[in-house]
Amino acid sequence: MGDSAVIAGQLFNGISLASILLLAALGLALSFGVMRVINMAHGEMLMVGGYISYLVLRVVHGPMAFVCALAAAFLGAALLGGLLELAIVRHLYGRPLDTLLATWGISLILQQGARSVFGPIGVEVTAPHWLEGSFVFEKGILAGVSLPYVRLFIIALAVFVLAAMGLFIARTSWGLWLRAVHQDREMAEAHGVNTRWVDLLVFALGTGIAGLAGSALALIAPVTPTVGQSYIVYAFLVVIVGGLGSLLGTILAAVLVGLFSSSVQIFTSVSLADVLLLVVVVIFIQFRPRGIVLRQSRALEEG
Amino acid sequence: MNRFFFNKRARFAVCGLAVLTVAIFVLPIRSGWAAEETIKVGVLHSLTGTMAISEVTVKNATLLAIEQINASGGVLGKRIEPVVEDGASDPAIFAQKAQKLIQEQKVVTVFGGWTSASRKAMLPVFERFHSLLWYPVQFEGNECSPNIMYSGAQPNQQILPALDWAYEKGYKRIFLLGSDYVFPRTANLILKKHIAHRGLVMTGEEYVPLGGTDFSSVITKIKLAKPDIIFNTLNGDSNVSFFKQMSAAGLPPSKLPVMSFSIAEQEAKAMGPSLVAGSYAAWNYFESLSASANKQFVKAYRAKFGQDSALDDPMAHGYIDVISWAAAVKKAGTLDPAAVRKAAAQLDWADSCMGKIKFAKNQSLYQTAYVGQLQPDGEFHILWQSKEPLLPEPYDPLSFPGKSCVLQ
């Protein structure tokens, strides 16, 4: 492998990491951006998605089984998120600390629930045959670079989710209401937008995307009761760096964090890269406390 | 004040409390009189928290040994009574519960511990009360206390034999990968000295934070380093991510061999054996060992705890610790910890589920090292074993020259 091949390989790793971070953080950015709800149980929604795909893969077989698993994980997690919103989160609006505590409690309950139902040691989700192996450059300056199909799939999925979300927000009437609530809740309400329904939709959509992410990440990581914990910190990091409540910022932040981590990791070590990442983020927040993209929003001013 | 006592409900409550208090203090004494005299031993493992997965099975194996000894008459003519406590995966709780077992429950010895952190936390307690802990897990060595019987492998009984095996197989370029904590760092410190000493090449050394899930850059480094074999001290779930991502990158264990030091039958079962099939492991016990003592052990354990139970190295050590303690008590004729530990080191060679074993003067165990290859069914196929049981060395002479473990 030549130098350019190594650089290209790491660039790919960075993009791959960015797509993982993005999938993990998108739902969080959505519910925080529109509803000001810091959902501590977001990581557990990824975990739920992983377990749902495990269950689906036990019943459904064949090459398209994993697609079914993805869909089921999205729907299942969205349903669970919707129920949580109706039962708990809805009653705590405007009380950020209480929401924090309540969703943290939910996260503990979900972890213990998974432990009681599936046991503490985790379950096995394996990639379907069509995702095995990798795309290898045979010649040219990139000779030796191999792009695993699983990682390409996760990148494609992240792009797909982004595109679908973009279309949804820009082109549908629900999207219009969502933007209205995001910009000014009271004014939207005064114009007849049912904010309760929008909140429910946003929360369910956010958790649904988390479930989808959990299902995809099960291809390269374990599915255990505590797996959500290993993503939640990075998801918050991306949302904060991106700018609270900004989807564009979240995307930029995920790409920056992914590229930064992978380029530092190759010169130092994984542990040191984590430390440097946190140092850089802390310094960054000092200068831009609102993140990369500043969003003008009444709701933010109030918060 | 008077009013309170005249209140009927309050009087009722006070009487109730009084009766309850008397009951709590008196009843145990009465039932104590009625029961036969027993010997209490402590069993201290994490029954909750992250370590529970591994430690509950060691506790089971320990209780099985106690039950078997009781069935054949107990020790010194008395029944052994296990007092089980939960260390809750927290070193501070391990220390606290150890003190409770010794002071309040008056146990004569304790079987338990898993992580080095839990052992280091309990060590001062056992030294202060002159009691004795039987520790069943392989560890990084570099410690030597008269109040601990270290039956788990010292580095020269697990990681160095694996290096011997790799050398014999002709693997020259070695990559060291581990989780970022004390065992992998110390193990690799020792390995590096021996790799250099044998004229082999260390092609890289990488650590990933505990629980880390992204190995993309590590895999790039492995590809650049072109090792013949990876020595893997990753812990827990990180292994799942590592093997999944290695396979996705076109490097399953069949293409690039991996020798793991923290994957036993339990872990392989949890990860899904198909994922790690073909990788190697070095231990002092495998479920597939053919000795008749092992066949009996496996059969007895499964009869008690379920036919699909996986048995592994720390469980075997938990089991033989109790057997060795009982034999030492018999030899010493007393329960005194100082006499028992001296007697334990003077016991003859014994045939156990792990092969021939004997406690050395440094209170660690002479034991055979095995290298196995994981099969798709979750069993290890044994490829290699050391010629004889290895003398345990708490301080590796190459890495820690001049240090030795001499106990009186």
Image (cartoon, rainbow, N blue to C red):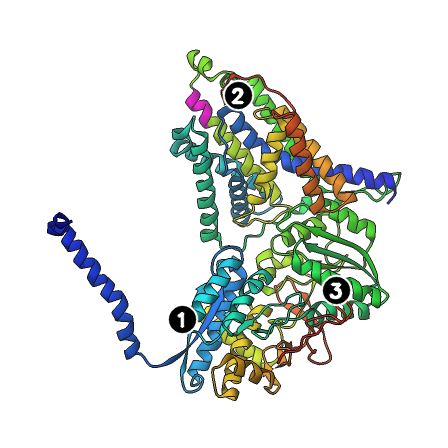
Identify the mark at residue B105; answer none if there is no mark.
1
| Crowding at mark 1 (Cα within 10 Å: few <14, some 14-19, many 20+) | some
Q: Chain of mark 3?
A: B
According to the picture, the residue beneath numbered tag 3 turns out to be B190
Camera-side residue: A18 or B294?
A: A18
Q: Tell me whether marks 3 and 2 sit on the same chain.
A: no
Tag 3: amino acid:
Ile
Q: Residue at the top extreme?
A: A191
**B93 in relation to B336, above or below:** above
Q: Earlier in the sequence, mark 3 or mark 1?
A: 1
At mark 1, the secondary structure is loop
Report the label total. 3
Quadrant (top left/top right/bottom left/bottom right) for the N terminus of chain A:
top right
Q: Chain of mark 2?
A: A
According to the picture, the residue beneath numbered tag 2 turns out to be A300
At mark 2, the secondary structure is helix
At mark 3, the secondary structure is helix
Q: Residue at x 60, y 84 (%)?
A: B350
Residue A10 in percent (x, y) is at 77, 40
Q: Residue at the front extreme?
A: B1
Tag 1: amino acid:
Gln
Q: Chain of mark 1?
A: B
**A94 in relation to B54, above or below:** above
Q: Main secondary structure of the magenta part?
A: helix
**How much space separates mark 1 and mark 2, taking CA atoms?**
59 Å
Tag 2: amino acid:
Leu
Query: Magenta part of the protein: which range?
Result: A195-200
Between disc 3 and disc 1, the foreground one is 1
| Crowding at mark 2 (Cα within 10 Å: few <14, some 14-19, many 20+) | some
